[in-house]
Amino acid sequence: MDQSNENAEFPSCDAYFEAIQSKKKLPLSLQESLTAAFAQIPVSSFPEVPTGRVIEIPGDTSVLEAVRILSEHNIRAAPVLNPEPGALADWKGRYLGVIDYSAVILWVLENAELASVALSAGSATAAGVGMGAVGAVGVAALGAAGPAAVAGLTAAAVGAAVAGGLTAEKGVANDGLAAADHLGEDFYKILLEQEPFKSTTVRSIVESYHWSPFVPITLDSSMLTVLLLLSKYRLRNVPVIEPDKPVIKNFITQTGVVKGLQQCKGRDWFDYISALPLSDLGLPFMSIDEVITVKSDDLILEAFKCMKNNKIGGVPVVEGPKRKLVGSVSIRDIRFLLLRPDLFSNFRQLTVIEFMKTLGSTLPDSENCLVQPPPTCAPDTSLGSVIDSIASRITHRIYVVDGDLEVVGVVTLRDVISCFIHEPPGYCNIYLASANIGEASGQRSQISGES
């Protein structure tokens, strides 16, 4: 495969990034000066992860165990190790990619639908079942086991999947979904205790559902490269490896970068920019009509589907015709549906507000961030205040509201990062070509998602 074809696998974000840049009001000369400065700062100068060690998850780890690891370490993503013996010694052979909540939510939604259809058909049989009958995740989980793995499903589950036409082309039968009102314990029996779902590994998820490519950089790279990958390409994290060594030494996230910017207080350039109101910087970049919301009486699964379909990391929860903000839900909250089976009682009819209230009444205060009022700001709030709010709350976004708490915009971590840099002509294309990224990451994934 030639280089041009490899780079074609790594989708271009030029048009989107140029649209964002056109809305920025910070003088171009200042952006170029800051860009030149960041280009001189080596990645090795960025602080290490708090524990001093990057958490890695073997590819043969179960999905549920992976979610527990992410939750216990309070992280949103982790590199996935290739479990195969004799894997290539470089990073392309050592790592399969990154597992995050964005990928997990896709797996949960598809399998929740499969389980609900299965439970709605009590007398179906498994006669004539094919590999495509259980959806994309089923195919990935079945692997070479084929009929043996299928046998692990109940006859009703397989038969209902076939009867309901559960394929990527046909979708899930509406009758099946409507009939499955009380999954509760049965959902776990099918999804987590029976094959092929019990054996579904992180590797299957990474290879099937991955929102962003695995794009490592070396310690001697510049921070400008990191900032552009996190903003232009909307990556949530960038793994850092040593030159000529495959081991990940650091994991730079959007949150970490914004916290680093916060520590620049006292420097003239930062104090000048951070004192400006959002409107003077062209923020929020997203117009009122572009803000995606969910209503408090929407089903919680519909809220997660909304995030999946729009490739975004979180949505504000609103009420009334004026979209008054009453809360927010993020992709990371899917962990509660996996780790708290009590919430699955009648979960297909669980509304967003009920989901929030249930967690508010059962979780300790330290975990109760979901039901706390989401961070907000006014259109004339300073960028510095926004940075402080985002950094202190460890959130990926802050909602811009008017005096009636109506949502009029959103400012994300990548928006904040974008304010400080300007891409030199061809910079990213040159980097991606020199790093040979297209072949390693593009074939397994696509760039998408918001944060």
Image (cartoon, grey):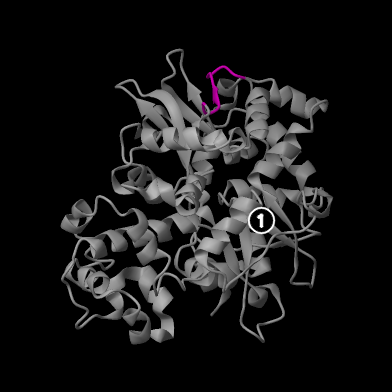
Determine which quarter of the picture holds residue 274.
Answer: top right
Q: Is residue 350 left or right of residue 44?
A: left
Q: Which residues are magenta?
A: 373-381
Q: Nearer the viewer, residue 415 or 122?
A: 122
Q: Does any portion of residue 425 appear in the rendered image?
A: no
**Residue at position x 43%, y 65% from top?**
192
Residue 152 x %, y %: 35, 78
Where 131 sits versus 15, above or below?
Answer: below
Q: Residue at x 36, y 57 (%)?
A: 185
Q: Is residue 113 magenta?
A: no
Left or right relative to 308: residue 38: right
In screen coordinates, is 359 left or right of 109?
A: right
The prevailing secondary structure element of the residues shown in magenta is loop
Mark 1 — residue? 238
Establish if 245 lies above or below 384.
below
Give the amino acid type for the residue marked by disc 1 in the picture.
Val
In percent of width and height, residue 195 lies at: 39, 74
Q: Residue drawn 17% across and 70% down?
A: 163
Residue 337 rendering spot, x and y as whole percentages: 44, 50
| Label total for image | 1
Q: Quadrant of residue 294?
A: top left
Residue in the foreground of this view, choosing between 154 and 377 = 154
Q: Residue furthest top?
A: 403
Within 10 Å of disc 1 (Cα), the crowding (few <14, some 14-19, many 20+) is many
Residue 200 seen in render: yes
Of 203 and 411, the residue lying toward us: 203
Seen in the picture, residue 310 relative to 6 is either above or below; the reply is: above
Q: Quadrant of the C terminus?
A: top right
Q: Quadrant of residue 321?
A: top left
Q: Is residue 377 magenta?
A: yes
